[in-house]
Amino acid sequence: GIQRGVFYRRDDGSVWIDLREDGLDEKLVLRSDGTSVYMTQDIGTAIQRFKDFSINRLTYVVGNEQDYHFRVLFLILKKLGYPWADDLYHLSYGMVDLPNGRMKSREGTVVDADDLLDEMEGTARSLSEELGKSEGLSEPEKAKLYQVLGHGALKYYILKVDPRKRMVFNPEESIDFNGNTGPFIQYSHARVRSILRKSEGLSRAWSWADVCLDERSKELIQTIYRFPEVVEQAARTFSPAVVAQFAYDLAKAFNAFYQSNSILNAESEALIAFRIDLSRATASSLKRALELLGIEAPERM
């Protein structure tokens, strides 16, 4: 870097790069005693990763407090002539605050992740028992359900927000069985699976000529049809929030369809078969969307 004029050495022996023409500052890359700084280590690590692994893009998932650091890092690597420097990306995520403010270790307001997960499971237990969501389940099944709901509530509440935005995590809101929450979507999936279990043994024969679609059915089909496009968009924009929004939209669309249409007691066998298949496609898409978010889709609730 020094030989190519990218870096320069000061009188005290330290090595720097001048990025002022690029709208940034001068940056130290090597101390006068020859020891490295964080920037030096990140430069070396990036170079080594592209040497050791067959990769075409490198994404750094780091909080937005390090935005400036990665702007400098990527620019340095580009000035050093590495062709893959344009394929580096900083997924800059916002911080998560509590309802009473920002978490600070000095003030003892940092929440341990394990403690938070335990708290979420406890909240899921209390609310599920209050609403009768776990009736008919064995004790092991109940324990598993509370874990799935608690963890799902936490993951979904965080992932539904664009990762670049700062957010406030409210445990009580996240566990609600109504609204844009993980448990609402999980309950919707369990409802569909219950219908499908009851449909076992019924005729599967139908054709489009035998089916007259109402508006709710059309909306549900159109929502399911969007799924591949949603996944592609989420990957392109590095935003799981897109998948989370789809899962919520699909759960809402199915519930609207369910409220407007009888599935197992429809007017004809063909219509019953069609609505069963539509329900099956809904359950499959809901489960896959939740899996992409790292959330389990319960079969029973």
Image (cartoon, rainbow, N blue to C red):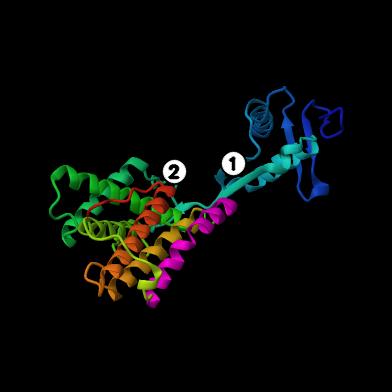
The quadrant holding residue 118 is top left
Write down the residue under mark 1.
Answer: 60
| Secondary structure category for the residue under label 1 | strand
Local packing at callout 2 (Cα closer than 10 Å; few below 14, some 14-19, many 20+) is few
Give the prevailing secondary structure in the magenta stretch: helix
- Is 301 placed left or right of 172 in the picture? left
- Is 61 placed left or right of 285 in the picture? right
The quadrant holding residue 276 is bottom left
The quadrant holding residue 28 is top right
- Asked if residue 49 is positioned above or below residue 178 in the image, the reply reads above
Quarter of the picture containing the N terminus is top right
Could you tell me residue 89's position as x and y percent? 64, 45
Kind of residue indicated by mark 2? Arg
**Which region is colored magenta?**
214-239
| Secondary structure category for the residue under label 2 | loop
Write down the residue under mark 2.
Answer: 106
